[in-house]
Image: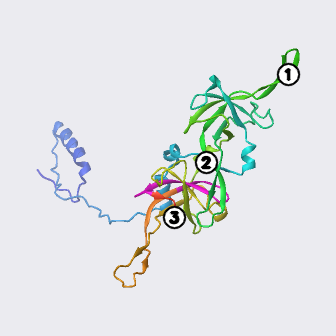
Amino acid sequence: MKLAIGYPLPRGWLAIAAMQCALSCAHGQIVPELDIQEEPPTERLLAQVRSEPLAARVSSALQTQSIEAFLSAPQVFDPAQFDALPRIVGAAEQKSLLSKRDVVYGRTAAGNGFVLSPEMPREWNIYRQPKALKDPATGQVLGMEAEYLGRARLLSDERVEQSQKEGKALDTIVPASFEIVHSVSEIRVGDRLFISNESAWRTLMPQAPEREVAATIISIYGSGVANASKHQIVVLNQGSQQGLSPGHLMSIRKTPSLRTDVTDPSRPALRPWVGVSGQALVFLTFDKLAYALISDSNGPVQVGDRLTSP
């Protein structure tokens, strides 16, 4: 007893047909035999190419959360501005070298500037006496760079209290107190306090500069070594006046070394072309200076190397 079905039966129906067959047999019915020799129709897919903008890939590869630990907070001042900054005047337990979790005392130039209020910032960066940064080509001073030492949190007000000494009224200065919450170097009495702006880094959107920009590395920040590598900070001789902005991605190009063409009897000088040797993210800019974090490098990065638009 065989009954052929005149159209192909999809594979998904095999289990249903078998169940119906079993139920029919159980009730004494004659069950048609299914012809399932034919394969269901298939659909052929063609290979396709997917594309996405370069900026999207770069942005995901350079999430600021992953590089935040390597960022520092260099700052450029003019000498008069630095001298007017609040200063560390002492420390609990009379320590001379201070670090994380130590309590320090700070004063403003006015003597009563630190007040615990909604308008007063709680986070303050700590800096040391600035040094001049010069353009290696022109010798021009581009700015005074103060070294970032750490960060402190304001704990109490700065105020003046009346006291008595030998029967005479005496004004006593009560400095503000701070807890050092982060340090990258030893902190000392005399170092300066400046409002922290680190939260701005969390909003960086990596992107290529809108126009061609080229800068030269003039210093390796916070290090006395000659070579820099991945996750170190370099200082550039171009800033916001030349079109650099935080978030700009730059290609690193080695300074080509001059060679002699030994195959030419006149021995002319050769300057070989050099390709991209790494990538850096600009995260802080001033008028004539910028700071960039080396995010990728296939070799040492040195003072004199160039950063260009990708």
Q: Residue furthest top?
A: 167
Q: Kindly indicate whether the residue at mark 1 contacts the one at mark 3 (C-beta within 8 angstroms).
A: no
Q: Residue at x 49, y 54 (%)?
A: 294
Q: Is residue 187 magenta?
A: no
- Calculate the distance from the C-alpha at mark 3 to the C-alpha at mark 1: 60 Å
**Which picture quadrant has residue 276?**
bottom left
The crowd level at tag 1 (other Cα within 10 Å; few <14, some 14-19, many 20+) is few
Tell me the tag on residue 170.
1
Amino acid of disc 2? Pro
Q: Which residue bears the numbered disc 2? A: 74
Q: Which residues are the magenta region? A: 281-300
Q: Nearer the viewer, residue 16 or 256?
A: 256
* Residue 229 appears left or right of 189: left
Q: Which mark is residue 306?
A: 3
> Which amino acid is tagged 1?
Leu
Residue 270 location in percent, x, y?
A: 42, 77
Cα distance in 3D space between marks 1 and 2 = 40 Å
Direction from residue 98 to residue 25 in the image, left or right: left
| First in sequence: mark 3 vs mark 2 | 2
Q: In the image shown, does 80 or 234 lie closer to the viewer?
A: 80
Is residue 257 shown above or below 149?
below
Label 2 SS: loop
Query: Seen in the image, is 26 located left or right of residue 46?
Result: left
